[in-house]
Amino acid sequence: MTTTPGQARSFPDSFVWGAATASYQIEGATTEDGRGPCIWDTFSATPGKVLDGHSGAVAADHYHRTAQDIAMMTELGLDAYRFSLAWPRIQPTGAGEFNAEGLAFYDRLIDDLLAAGIDPVVTMYHWDLPQPLEDAGGWPARDTALRFADYAQKVVESYRDRVKVWTTLNEPWCSSYLGYASGVHAPGRQDAADALAAVHHLNLAHGLAGRVVRDVLGEAGTLSLTLNLHVARPDDPSKPEDVDAARKIDGLANRVFLQPVLDGRYPADVIEDTSHLSDWSFVRDGDLVTTHTGLDVLGVNFYSTQRVRRYVPDHERTMADGHGASAASAWVGADDVEFLPQPGPHTAMGWNIDPSGMTELLTGLSRTYPDLPLMVTENGAAFADEVTAAGRVHDAERVSYVARHVDAVGQAMDAGADVRGYFVWSLMDNFEWAYGYHRRFGIVRIDYETQERIWKDSAYWYRELVRTHQIPAPESAPSLA
Ligand code: PNW
């Protein structure tokens, strides 16, 4: 996959092009056909937690529109579709009885995808924890990992003949630290020790579910885990304290998830950095054998980069401006790390656009784990899309964002990284967690009044990319309409 200047970059024929979604973000139908309540139903019904009180109750109504949505994927020419199974649909209380209607919904979805020639890439857990499991302690409780193993057994056995790629978890960083430390995600708890226990029980859940995939499918299965790895650069690389700040973030965000799975251990520096918060006694004998599944492919979600330095607390300022009791941080054990504002441009999330981080992340991973295939399971951007009088969405910024990041993936491949595919986030606009419907990541627009699907320019452009395996010129998008 070599490129000379002026020549379009092209990707191998075997490279997988896809789009991604998640159950709670698109399905709606949260009380239909026996689905049980999940932590995001509860959280979004709690005043002040989600912007404007939005919830996933209707979302993009995908539950009732799967045929139309698969037809759209076919038109886009996708090789694969990454989606998640709603645990509360399949096992409404998170324990015991399974729900035949929930199982049947994904059964049909998988069949219809295969009939359309689209590979289903299944994530078992994308944050919709059954509420009864949260009531019993949630991810800080060890039992949640054991319950997850039972659920995994059921879904892998149910779809084993048709689903090859099994991703256990999506972004356990978010589930643990945003759910239990900063509390900006469901269930909205704020306790650093709980967040660390959640980290371990999510790793354990991966390990137990990974064992199921290996036992049931053997060589026929592809075991995966998707992480939102952070590229945190020291503000001043010549300052040891800034380099140390970056090390801390790398530990808490990346190595604490990678190492138990790929190396069978926890990073000693993370345990030390957090020792004033937790004694890590939740790690029991044998756990690290369980978590140490290895992976057939690592899923990488990438959006942005971070710049960090050693934080020197300014007590006078904090007290004067009334921010003494500041919001809880997601970065447990890193109170002395400051995240600096990044130069623009930024997306509508306020995240800076820095494709070099994608190349750095993928090449870094392939240096640390030379035999580990990689897959970009999410990359994309929210922008303030507008619909023209003619009903078009000229999202040139999104086209540019995706083009530059796909090129950055190509650069990592040129440098030797074994990247097998790319999934744009997202196939369609959806419930963007704490931001509700106020952030749009789709290459297809959802009109939430009519549930109409409207192709943005980026969708036409992406179709060209998928068809040619080359990065199309940005102008080629609208002309295809
Ligand atoms: C990921 N952060 O979430 C998720 O996998 C998707 O469900 C989500 O829609 C997408 O990225 C866009 O946000 C993240 O605060 C949420 O760093 C928050 C963060 C990162 C990823």
Image (spheres, rainbow, N blue to C red):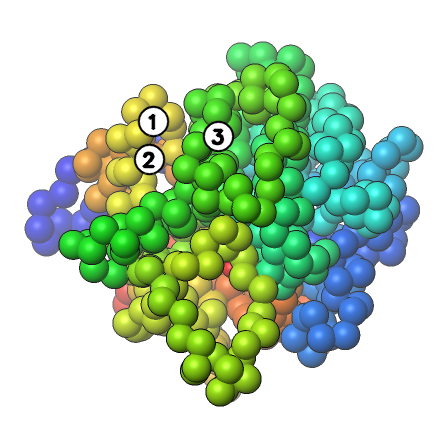
Residue drawn where x is 62% and y is 63% of the image = 184
Residue drawn where x is 64% and y is 42% of the image = 198
Q: Quadrant of the C terminus?
A: bottom left
**Around disc 1, counting alpha carbons within 10 Å, would you say few (fewer than 14), some (14 to 19), or many (20 or more)?**
some
Q: Earlier in the sequence, mark 1 or mark 3?
A: 3
Label 2 to label 1: alpha-carbon separation: 6 Å
Q: Which residue is mark 2?
A: 365
Looking at the image, can residue 154 be seen? yes
What label sits on residue 369 in the rendered view? Answer: 1
* Residue 327 picture quarter: bottom right
What label sits on residue 266 in the rendered view? Answer: 3
The kind of residue tagged 1 is Tyr
Which residue is nearer to you in this view: 477 or 435? 435
User: Percent position (x, y) of residue 393?
Assistant: 46, 74
The kind of residue tagged 3 is Tyr
Element under disc 1: loop
Looking at the image, can residue 454 be seen? no
Q: In the rendered image of this protein, does residue 151 appear above or below residue 476?
A: above
Q: Is residue 90 left or right of residue 472?
A: right
Residue drawn where x is 39% and y is 33% of the image = 374
Residue drawn where x is 73% and y is 33% of the image = 142
User: Percent position (x, y) of residue 42?
Assistant: 80, 60
Which residue is nearer to you in this view: 301 or 122? 301
